[in-house]
Amino acid sequence: MSTAVGYYATLPLTQCIASAKMQLRIEVSDDDVWFEKLANEAARHMDSLTVFVKRQCQLAIVDGKAKLPNGFYRMLGLRLGGGFNGASLFYVDTPFLSNCGINNGDNTLFGTSLINGSVQNGSGTFQIQNGYIYFATGISMIDPVTKQVTYATSVDCAFIGLNVDDNGLMIVREDMERGIVAYICYMYMLQNPDKYPAGIWQEHKATWQAQKEWIKSIDVQNDFRQTRRQIAAIANAWVVDKNWWM
Amino acid sequence: MTLKEIVEHVQATPEGAVISDRSRFDIGYLESVIITYRARLLRLIYLKNKRINPVCYQKHWPKFEVDLQDDPCVVKFRHPEVISLDDMSDGFRYIGALSFTDAYPRIKSTAWLSTFNHNRVTAANNDRRTTVLYDGNQQVIEVRGNLEIEEIMTESLLANPLSVPTYNKAVDQFPLNEDLIPDLLAMIFQEQTSIEATVPLKPNSPTLAAQRGRRRS
């Protein structure tokens, strides 16, 4: 994942589709829907560092579960919204903790971050299954005066996910356009082998593969530029202060 | 050439460029023959060149009919039949906004609609884009994804150029480029000649008498 979030100018998938149609000399819109799927697929399979980014959103809790956002890949953190003061929820592997001997019911282990009880009873924890976040307990609170129970209705989620727009389609950078166009042309010609000689679609396939490698290498290069100071700081610590790791 | 001129051409050619009220060709019949052969000729031209002259396209602005809206998920517009060109393309060139800036993505058939709706990216009714589907059986364009649309424009190769109100057969140029008119006439006469050659002559036909005279001499 690249730390260079929001670094590049983006363009809509429709521009890639229009470019592919110009390349293929297609006037009509009969294949536009399919081309949009291909463009989204190509952007995903660029498989570069900037395909995944840090994102944040608010999810609604319904019946004790919340649907994962589009493009979700890995959770970073969950905090309850509304009047719950941003209380954190935890994803814990309780069998693992038990094997390590730390899940002994001590509810002070995680300090005041837990709402109720300990990790052992699942309070304040969640699991992810089949595209949903399931909350065990700990998403409710009781008013000390009125004794009224209030359940959380939303949760703020920070996660690592695909770089997608609100509709779940990949966000495309300007320098990805050529590769995506090559991919669309290649797939279109594969569907019409009698109309296009093998040499033509192989050329598009080679362009797609070369562009994919180029985008990956650019992202790695930029990522190194972003993080080289941190790498240098760690290396310096090892070199300058030998006592640090001894 | 207008349609009227082409009809006169077809009438006059076998009769020495003379048109009289004794012509054996019915005008209505000739018009339907010309329209049919135009469709066939355009298809052959497209198969050969993969390109049609822009003169052949006709623009149409389907009217929004309230009585036609019987499905809450789509907006429907009537549209006449279009020519079929090859296995991948039919006569529609543009279906979209009036400004020519937004051609709506086309779904080729109801079967494809079902397939697309099983994919999150291509689903037609996800309000993310406007798509169109032409139901050839009902001759209706279905617009999906935007229920606010009340106007669309199409540019197409109509199977019958007379089926739209914007075409006046008396004054408007027939939607076929001039250099294809001789090919059209050749196709018509080839068909006519081959049919007439199989029809037996009447006993008092002057042609038959002339043939008998030649045999006697």
Image (cartoon, coloured by chain):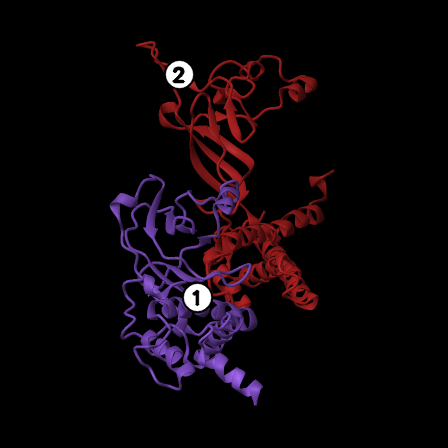
Kindly indicate whether the residue at mark 2 contacts the one at mark 1 (C-beta within 8 angstroms).
Answer: no
Tell me the distance, in whole angstroms, between the alpha carbons under discs 1 and 2: 77 Å
Residue B184 versus residue A79 in the image, above or below: below
Measuring from the top left, give residue B164's x and y in whole percent.
Answer: 31, 62
Q: Which residue reaches farthest left?
A: B66
Residue A189 in sight from this viewpoint = yes
Q: Secondary structure at mark 1?
A: helix
Measuring from the top left, give residue A208's x and y in whole percent.
Answer: 63, 61
Question: Which colour represents chain A?
Answer: red
Q: Chain of mark 2?
A: A
Query: Which amino acid type corresponds to the residue marked 1 in the rendered image?
Result: Thr
Q: Report the side of B6 relative to A53 (left or right).
A: left
Question: Which colour represents chain B?
Answer: purple
Which is nearer the eye, A152 or A241?
Answer: A152
Measuring from the top left, give residue A5's x and y in whole percent.
Answer: 50, 50
Q: Nearer the viewer, mark 1 or mark 2?
A: 1
Q: Which residue reaches farthest front?
A: B216
Q: Report the side of B105 relative to B214 (left or right).
A: left
Residue A11 in sight from this viewpoint = no
Query: Which amino acid type corresponds to the residue marked 2 in the rendered image?
Result: Met
Q: Quadrant of residue B100?
A: bottom left
The residue lying at 68 percent from left, 67 percent from top is A197
Q: Where, quadrant-wise, is the C terminus of chain B in this rendering?
A: bottom right
Q: Secondary structure at mark 2?
A: strand
Measuring from the top left, give residue A222's x and y in whole percent.
Answer: 58, 57
Q: Report the side of B86 relative to B181 (left or right).
A: right
Instruction: Name the disc covering residue B36, or none.
Output: 1
Instruction: Name the disc covering residue A141, or none.
Output: 2
Q: Chain of mark 1?
A: B
